Image (tube, rainbow, N blue to C red):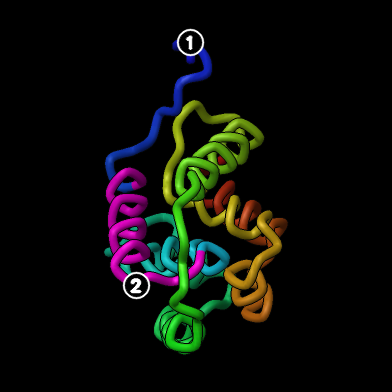
Amino acid sequence: MDSENKLRLTSDTIGILKRAKSDFLASQCREDVSLLFVLRTIARWDRKVSNMALVQCGAELHLLDSAIEELLGRAPRDRVGMTNVFEAIALNAKAASERMGVDFVASEHLVLAILNSGDESARLLVERNVTSDNYSATIHEMYGS
């Protein structure tokens, strides 16, 4: 990968992905719920733009966390093998950051990647009135652009 296409992850984004991956591996859950671990980690992360924007969009983080825990509690625990799902979310977050005109990947870009995934974690956000459009608009307001 040349330097122009290199991922520039913030330290918090790296921490979020490492924590989510560690929790995911320990859970033995199937990969189809892996983004729930990323979303749960973001929701629990202390005072980040991403979770402040979720709240501004109408999500109550403690209720979101409870819904994630409920889904994870029912998730099948029969994982076989491992793919690069966490690397894929980072690449999708990079695409989201580029669409926003920034050259780094922060936790808010992970949320946009989750929203664009169409999986269970995206459904949880949409049920709480967090969509790609209103989340992006909120992030732009917070960035002041």
Is the residue 144 above or below the residue 1 in the image? below
Q: Amino acid at mark 2?
A: Ser
Which-is-in-front pick, marks 1 and 2?
Answer: 2
Camera-nearest residue between 54 and 79:
79
- Identify the residue under disc 1: 2
Is the residue 143 above or below the residue 58 in the image? above
Graded by Cα atoms within 10 Å as few (under 14), some (14 to 19) or many (20 or more), the crowding at tag 2 reads: some
Is the residue 89 above or below the residue 23 in the image? above
Q: Are marks 1 and 2 in contact (CB under 8 Å)?
A: no
Camera-nearest residue between 68 and 53:
68
Question: Which one is earlier in the sequence, the residue at label 1 or at label 2?
Answer: 1
Q: Which residues are magenta?
A: 13-30
Tag of residue 90 = none
Q: Could you give the CA–CA distance between mark 1 and mark 2, rounded to whole angstroms?
A: 35 Å
Q: Is residue 26 magenta?
A: yes
Residue 94 drawn at (x, y percent): 54, 35
Tag of residue 27 = 2
Is the residue 5 above or below the residue 114 in the image? above
How many numbered discs sit on the rendered protein? 2
Q: Main secondary structure of the magenta part?
A: helix
Q: Is residue 135 magenta?
A: no
Callout 2 secondary element: helix
Graded by Cα atoms within 10 Å as few (under 14), some (14 to 19) or many (20 or more), the crowding at tag 1 reads: few
Callout 1 secondary element: loop
Residue at position x 66%, y 56% in the image: 117
Residue at position x 36%, y 51% in the image: 17
Q: Amino acid at mark 1?
A: Asp
Camera-nearest residue between 83 and 145:
83
Residue 66 drawn at (x, y percent): 43, 87
Residue 77 drawn at (x, y percent): 44, 77
